[in-house]
Image: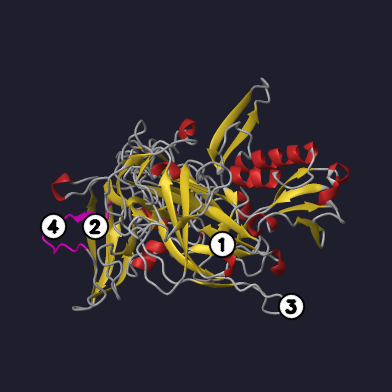
Amino acid sequence: MLLPADSVLKVKTRGVEIRPFFSPDRYENVLLYNQPDPEKPGYNPNEEHAGIYTSFKYLTAPNPPSAAFALRNNLNITTQDENFTSMPFVLVQYTDKRIQKTKMSLYKIDIQDHSVGYTFQYPMKAGEPVFGPYPLNEVIGANPPPEIYGENGEPDTQITYWEDHKGSPWCISGGTYLFAYFYYPLDPSFWHPKKKAGETICFSMTDGISPQQVRYDTEWPEKIPVLKIGETLTFSGGEYRADHPTEPGLPGVISWAAGQVLFDSLNPLMDASLFFTMYQVRLAQMLEKISVDLKISYLPNSLKPGGNITVSGDKWLFNELNAGLKSRLYYDYIMNKLCFQGLLNDKSLGDSSLTEAPPSIYVLQPNILTSREKDDIMSLSGINNAFRQSIESLYSLSRDPDDFNKNYTVGISKTQTVNSETGDITETISQISAPGPGLAVVCNPYLVGPTHPYSQGYVVLAENNLSSLGDLPVALHIIKIDKDETYRGSIKVIDSDNVFDEKITLRHTADFGANPDDLIFEWWYREEDGVDQLPPGLSESGVWSLFPDNSGNNGLGMNEICMAGTGKILLVDNYFLYAIAIKAVPTYRNPGLPGQGLQIIIHTWMCIKPNWPMVGLSGLLPGLILLKHALLIFPVMPLQPISV
């Protein structure tokens, strides 16, 4: 009987004291009796694959007692002839220090005992490795045999059993159960009629051929780090942890060598056909450079030296673009490629300080083009059809890298396998196992609307599950997404590399992985005049102004704004208010109140104090002062219909 308790081997008393374990204060030299030579007296091989191990009950004690455990009772040859080995009992010899005598105890092996709860059914938590029951896990050791396998307990409802690239089994979800079937290597002290030491044998308590089914009832851990709706995960911690310092923090995926989404409770079977719509988060490489071919002869003259560009090493930067795009889009004139890269905290992939602790306000600018960014690039002066086609290709590549012919498939991959005999091609769709560093986890923007039935869920991420990483340890991380926890974030000023550009870009840190096209963004501002004012809609008319959306899309997908020139907004101090609303909600709004009736998601206050210097080369960057940021709750007011 192999169970996490010390009376696994029940004493056959014969009038002696029952000893479930051997305390070191009283007993010493505790050994399993094992005499495998049939030609010598006292023949009794270890067919039970028993051993003396630390007592499970006192496993973490400073000086734990030992106990006897056995793995089986079905290898003994009990026929009374020349093949006889021994009866299925275990002998333990020891010295009783109290009386200074050596003794033996005889133990009978029971498989299960339901009366005391000893069954092959155990609790475990999601995110844990699936270990064999103690001490089978000790016998298996650090290199589990590849024959070990498992099954989902509810295969039509939810997956929970998973093996990493090394073949190690894990539990990847709670609220269900799984089955595991174990194999172990033969220890030199174990007897077997056919196999030799080191060979693999199944853990079987029945016929010795079929492995024992072990059930694990799974549950989610009680303390799980929370990712807020709209929050982008790169560095460790997270806004929820900042609000609740005693709660666990989110993992820092930016520095992982590889990452993958293993389980998403919105798609509990991880059905590949639902990857594109039913998801809470996507994990992907957000900084890596992507590129398309564009011969230099096809590049318009306006984007060549002598035109409106800046030459930086092997890059041509396009001066007309705002700071957020100019730093990411460039032409590599050596390789004849149009390139787009991601930035985090103004750093690119390969920066030696990329994974260092970030400042209080930082933003991810992913290697994914939004439709607005594409339109901004298309508005460059003097561009030709070849350049436009290259931008369209770059846009598609950034949003649909594996060519699913869908709008946004970041974080999803497909592999094709050719049958060597038939030539048939099989296509497999999976969550990408993305190499790092430069990884990020982004939320699904469609979950934030009040009409979506989603309330909260769990996501399990795998770190380092890539065969090319060799022996680098695999780890699982569970995060919880709660719809009631809305990300406040901050507004980041993105400066131009040229202080004389007179351009400044404001970007909120909630970007939904460059997939904000179904969200309405409103930017409100007013001059800082030393007078405290209520938010728009609660203050007097004319105090606040809505930053115009010159695209005519009424703020749809406008997660950043660019201010240029020497207009009033750049010559005085201004407060900025940022709000996100949901496109799908009925379009009713109280005049002057941002997003009224549209389900406001995020509000952030900030103040910019531009000070454009006209001379000198040092200290020319415009200043930024973050005054305060807070979640604002607007009261319900009479609504009037508008058209969005």
Q: Which residue is mark 4?
A: 14
Residue 255 — which label?
1
Q: Which residue is mark 3?
A: 617
**Residue type pointed to by label 1:** Ser
Whole-percent x and y of residue 238?
43, 62
For discs 2 and 4, the disc positioned in front in the rendered view: 2
Q: Quadrant of residue 567 in the image?
A: bottom right
Q: Quadrant of residue 429 in the image?
A: top right
Q: Which residue is mark 2?
A: 5
Give the Cα separation between the discs numbered 3 and 2: 74 Å
**Residue type pointed to by label 3:** Leu
Whole-percent x and y of residue 240?
37, 62
Q: Is disc 1 placed on a helix, strand or loop? A: helix
For discs 2 and 1, the disc positioned in front in the rendered view: 1
Q: Earlier in the sequence, mark 2 or mark 1?
A: 2
Residue stretch rendered in magenta on the structure: 3-20
Give the Cα separation between the discs numbered 2 and 1: 41 Å
Give the residue displayed 17% in from the left and 54% down from the top. Answer: 12
